[in-house]
Amino acid sequence: MSLVFYLFALSLGLATVLASICIWSPRAVWLKVGALVIALLFLPTTYVSVVELLSRPKPIALEWKQPDFSEAKVLAADMREGESIYLWLRMPGVEEPRFYVLPWDQELAKQLHGAQRDANAQGTAVHAKNLFRTNRDPQQPMFYAMPQPAQPPKVPPVYDPLIFESGARQLRHDGI
């Protein structure tokens, strides 16, 4: 299950506890009914707000669970000049891609655009390094194109002295 459903279940439990406190407290009936109505309105509001957040990018600065990896693959990027940089990232060990937003930074936009151009030319992917660090080195590039993978080593052909190959014909010498 998703974290969203756990958060909704937690809010449902809290609302249930609050509603039961409202019902069993020694207060006036109109106060109890009002508190119960507020608790009941809390549930759909919480569900709608949490579900609405699913399609929105998460600001990098609000990543409360700092990832323990330093590198992520950039699946897609959208730059809105003067506004923000939107990133779809695939992180190691995480099944689904994540959607983040960075505040606009001219240098980061240049790095990202250059990395995308290099990756397209080489046929590789763009990666982001140290994206979640708050104290990153400005001299180190954050976005870069992956280098082309090395060609597999050539395996020398196996030479069998008992096989004679001549064009399309093959003659085998059985030693007799």
Image: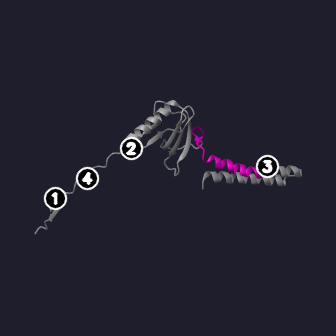
* Quadrant holding the C terminus: bottom left
Return the x and y of residue 27 as percentages of the image width and height. 88, 50
Residue on which the image places disc 3: 38
Left or right? Give the position of 10 relative to 26: left
Q: Residue furthest right?
A: 28
**Amino acid found under the numbered disc labelled 3:** Ile
Return the x and y of residue 45 as percentages of the image width and height. 72, 49
Give the colouring mode of the picture: one colour
Return the x and y of residue 7 as percentages of the image width and height. 66, 51
Figure check: 24 above or below 83: below
Asked if marks 4 and 2 touch (Cβ < 8 Å), the reply is no
Tell me, yes or no, if residue 137 can be seen here: no
Secondary element type, mark 1: loop
Front disc: 3 or 4:
3
Instruction: Give, as a single range, the part of the protein colored magenta.
Output: 38-62
Secondary element type, mark 2: loop
Between residue 68 and residue 115, name the one nearer to us: 115
Return the x and y of residue 49 as percentages of the image width and height. 68, 47
* Neighbourhood count class around disc 2 (C-alpha, 10 Å): few under 14, some 14–19, many 20 upward: few
Between residue 139 and residue 80, name the one nearer to us: 80
Front disc: 4 or 2:
2
Secondary element type, mark 3: helix
Residue on which the image places disc 2: 123
Residue on which the image places disc 4: 155
Residue on which the image places disc 1: 167
Q: Residue furthest bottom?
A: 176
Q: CA distance from mark 4 to mark 1?
A: 22 Å
Which callout, 2 or 1, points at the residue further toward the start of the chain?
2
Q: CA distance from mark 2 to mark 1?
A: 37 Å
**Most common secondary structure along the magenta stretch:** helix
